[in-house]
Amino acid sequence: MKNILLLCTIFLLITSSLFATNNIGAGFILGDPSGLTAKFFMGKSDAIDIGIGESADDLYIYGDYLRHFYGIFPLNELAVYFGAGGALHDWEHHKKHYYYEDELRIEIRIPCGIEFIARKVPIGVFLELVPVLRFIPQVDFGIRGGLGARYYF
């Protein structure tokens, strides 16, 4: 019981420090995929981006590590980012009338994008392009991406 209480206390301390510094953003992305997204900053330049949504009317879940670069543009609020991650795509293929084939696709993602995070109002607007390499069930290449926004708290 003491261990559980200690873990809960540590968790509350960590999450309260994250919430106090606007390190967590939650919002949406429109494109491929379209859905919900969240970003967790682990410092000024490093972040984890996760999302769940719909791609071609099927479930798409992804997670990326992102590295942000500031100072490329004259605005301090504008950052360029690059990263790497992975995705699961539960794809349903219509083969014949009343016959569907389910396929679990696994992809490697290489996201690159630009994000503007306003200082006065903690809202970020981003545009990203994501080349993907699908390697299960067959090897294939594609491009994903979208436009989105997050509220940072």
Image: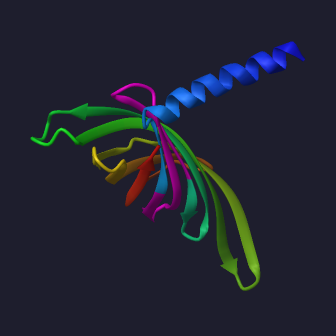
Looking at the image, which residue is at 33% across and 28% down?
45
Q: Which of 63 and 150 is in front in this view?
A: 150
Q: Nearer the viewer, residue 46 or 121?
A: 121
Q: Nearer the viewer, residue 2 or 43?
A: 2
**From this viewpoint, is residue 143 visible?**
no
Q: Residue furthest right?
A: 1
Using the image, determine if residue 114 lies above or below residue 47.
Answer: below
Q: Which quarter of the figure is the N terminus placed in? A: top right
Using the image, determine if residue 84 lies above or below residue 133.
Answer: above
Question: Where in the figure is residue 25, as x and y percent of width and height?
Answer: 46, 45
Question: Where in the figure is residue 145, as x and y percent of width and height?
Answer: 38, 57
Query: Left or right: 1 with respect to 134?
Result: right
Question: Where in the figure is residue 116, as x and y percent of width and height?
Answer: 27, 48
Looking at the image, which residue is at 51% across and 35% down?
19
Colouring method of the image: rainbow
Using the image, determine if residue 63 lies above or below residue 101.
Answer: above
Q: Which residue lies furthest to the bottom in this view?
A: 97
Query: Left or right: 138 with respect to 47?
Result: right
Q: Write the start and end of the magenta stretch as one range.
A: 28-51
The quarter holding residue 135 reads top right
Q: Nearer the viewer, residue 86 or 123?
A: 123
The quarter holding residue 41 reads top left
**Residue 2 among magenta residues:** no
Question: Where in the figure is residue 106, as x and y percent of width and height?
Answer: 59, 46
Main SS class of the magenta portion in the image: strand
**Residue 50 among magenta residues:** yes
